[in-house]
Image (spheres, coloured by chain):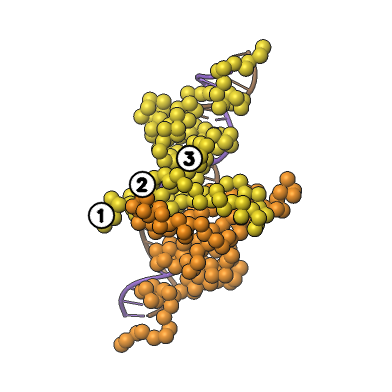
Chain colours: A orange, B yellow, C purple, D brown
Amino acid sequence: MVQKQGKENAFTRRGCKNTKSRKAIISLLEKAETPLSAEEIFLQLKEAGVSANLSTVYRNLELMESLGLAGKMVMNDGKARFEITGEGHKHHLICTSCHKMIAIDFCPMESLQKDVIDKTNFDITGHKLELYGVCPECRKTE
Amino acid sequence: MVQKQGKENAFTRRGCKNTKSRKAIISLLEKAETPLSAEEIFLQLKEAGVSANLSTVYRNLELMESLGLAGKMVMNDGKARFEITGEGHKHHLICTSCHKMIAIDFCPMESLQKDVIDKTNFDITGHKLELYGVCPECRKTE
DNA sequence: TTTCGTGCAAAGTGTTTGCAGGCGA
DNA sequence: TCGCCTGCAAACACTTTGCACGAAA
């Protein structure tokens, strides 16, 4: 009756079922270059032939966030976006004109976190950094 | 018919009227220690005896943002907060337990902005940095 | 089989908008 | 006075929730 087999995954390992839509969402997020909104995920699922209801998408994203599999960030447009929780976290540079988003790989906080902890006595658990600007393409056409 | 008098202010200077609610909102934001949500502003106005409709609050905050008088930031709870645009911009450390927010005065981006511009060719116009953690008080009671 | 997950529709939030009347310049 | 500002109510967009059916373990 032991059920520990090689067949485990991020969901079953935590007592959740490994459903079609969950697999599909994880796989989308894994190959996404930028954080995705619930609606984007919903549409991309449909395109991939794994249609899931929008509520299901929201419920699964919430689950994945609580399991620590995905991170949620709300951007200034009021929409939440989600990204896979990888080893190296990323920040983003967002074009205020065309809303293109590109990932930047360095993080100025890594070296400063300790300093802030000392100063504030907070137990720092994470951070969010977004840069805003105008991308080269938009600058041309302006 | 010249109307340039010492009586100018941030609004009239830009062709907008200096109404009671606008004065009150600016003054609230000026003395606020942390960014305020529209609802908080709405309630504090009422308390101060300068009741304004919630739509009016939103409209004025939007105006102030477009005039560059205030900055908007959307936090992970999905609510927008506003703060006065001062000389030295600030970032915030937010307790994920009690949602207390404290301002931190240093900015790691200042020294790095130039570097990012070189790397990405974006015309960087701003950034947002938020730190998350658990404050000393909440850590005690957990 | 049993329990968890899903679709559907309806309800919730925070925010925006159209319109008629009111106030600031 | 004149036109911008405001209050009100309705519309919006995104997200959440209740319920009954369906699928994973």
Q: Is residue B98 left or right of residue A95?
A: left
In this rendering, the answer to whether A68 lies above or below A115 is below
Can residue A40 be seen? no
In this rendering, the answer to whether B90 lies above or below A109 is above
Q: Which tag, 2 or 1, sits closer to the chain's start?
A: 2
Mark 2: secondary structure: loop
**Which residue position holds label 3?**
B82
**Which residue position holds label 1?**
B140
**Which residue position holds label 2?**
B100
- Asked whether disc 2 touches disc 3, contact meaning CB atoms under 8 Å apart, the reply is no
- Asked whether disc 2 touches disc 1, contact meaning CB atoms under 8 Å apart, the reply is no
Q: Are marks 2 and 3 on the same chain?
A: yes
- Which of B66/C19 is in front? B66
Q: Is residue B1 left or right of residue B129?
A: right
- Which of A8/B131 is in front? B131
In this rendering, the answer to whether B115 lies above or below C15 is below
- Asked whether disc 3 touches disc 1, contact meaning CB atoms under 8 Å apart, the reply is no
